[in-house]
Amino acid sequence: MPFLLKDISEVTPQKICEYIKMHRTNLSSRYQRLKDYYTGKHDILLRRPKRKDDPCNNIVCNYAKYITDVGSGFLIGEPISYQSEDSDLTDLLEWYRKAEVDVQDSDNAEDQSIYGVAYELVYMSSDDSPTPKTASIHPSQGFVIYNNTVELLPIAGVYYHETRDTVTQQVNGYDAEISTDKQYIRFHLTTDYALDGEVTTEGNPFGMVTLIEIYNNRFHQGDFEQLISLINGYNKQQSNRVDDKEEFVNSLMVLKGQTLGYSDDERSETYKDIKENGVMELTPESDVSFLTRQADQQGDQLLAESLAKDIHKFSYIPDLTDEHFAANVSGVAMQFKLWGLMQLMKKKERYIKEGLRYRIKLFSAILAITGKKPVDVENVTITITRNLPKNLVELAQVIGNLSGICSNETLVAQLPFVEDPEQEVKKAAEEKRQAMDEQFVMSTAAVTQNNDTE
């Protein structure tokens, strides 16, 4: 649900209060449900037995967490790399290292997968030498306001959080911080979303909205959001199977042709004796059996497998525990098996790179203020490497074949064990130069020795 305004003139504290109320009313319950499913709080836990003594196992098979962890790890399992032939990225990458942006990238990918959107707040550190830093903001605590044109340009970023009474710890309102291209606006809201107290303003050194919104897809849906009914079905199926097994263990004994006592006390004593000794004496004409319900174990197994396959199919996340998944397959064959997942990741990657470019602009604005050379974001190549097992022999062959076609920095960036391709290329060039110098010295010495011998 995009929040739109005509222009910056409409960004007032009263309008922000109204939008915060809309945000919490319309989206907070959805975000909470998605968080619950990721953390294992599924609907199956609310199931109760039909009768008092019936077994009621509430088993959570957390496919929601599996889908998010595997998908986000596959997408951002490796640090994102940046290269530019026209701009010096040394200062930018040093600030990125201090800000630990790799952690934020991983958190953002996780939030994208769970909630369908991720938010990153860029701010200035509070130490003696302030530098830009980043923080992941939970989707229930922020949103971006855009202008109502086809460009959908951000005009305000809203970050708010609960405040609590110091004694009772009850929520007593919200603190809000709004960033525009020119200033920060801060104020307090009551629990009824009414403006409470003074509104303060402060200049914004970034010159841009500092809250970055990163979508998971155009519909802002999480990776497992459409699969909750399938996950519920799988949880119920597995719980019912355990219930059936428990009912079988606790099945009723049927005794024919014999009684275990003529009074309640006698029968109770006999039951106790049978339980303690595990032996029961029967007359020749009597018989004992157990009353059980015949369970269709094969049908139950097929249903469970069908539900699991549907979850994997519609999430595009493969079953990594399948013994046939990666058995003796080449790199090309593995990519074919992961084709659906790769297409999903490409869609995500477009939105991630859009957010990363915006982050570069924010950091570059501070570079310019501090007298350092700003970075031209249009000349920066962002590489997101899939976290897959690497066949280094095949990869080396590919890099060798592409030598002279692609830049050395681009080729080196494909190597999973290289963290900084730019520095690696410089080190390789320096080592090559040193080797040539050594070879030249050795050749010169050999020529001199030959001349002396003659």
Image (spheres, rainbow, N blue to C red):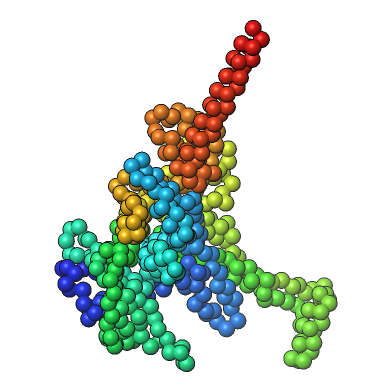
Residue 372 image point, x, y percent: 35, 54
**Above-or-below relation of 412 to 181:** above
What residue is rendered at 45% in x and 54% in y? 94
Picture quadrant where residue 240 is located: bottom right
Relative side of 320 to 361, left or right: right
State the quadrant of the C terminus. top right
- The percent coordinates of residue 193 (x first, y second) are 29, 84
- Quadrant position of the N terminus in the picture: bottom left
Residue 381 horizontal/vertical position (percent): 36, 45
98 and 417: which is toward the camera: 98
Q: Foreground residue, 228 or 73? A: 73
Side (left or right) of 411 relative to 354: right
Q: Between residues 274 and 411, which one lies in front from this camera angle? A: 411
At horizontal 45% and vertical 42% (from top left) the residue drawn is: 422
Farthest residue, direction top: 454
Q: Is residue 311 visible?
A: no
Q: Nearer the viewer, residue 432 or 318?
A: 432
The residue sitting at 60% across, 15% down in the picture is: 448
Where 298 falls versus 119 (above or below)?
Answer: above
Whole-percent x, y for residue 414 in the image: 47, 40
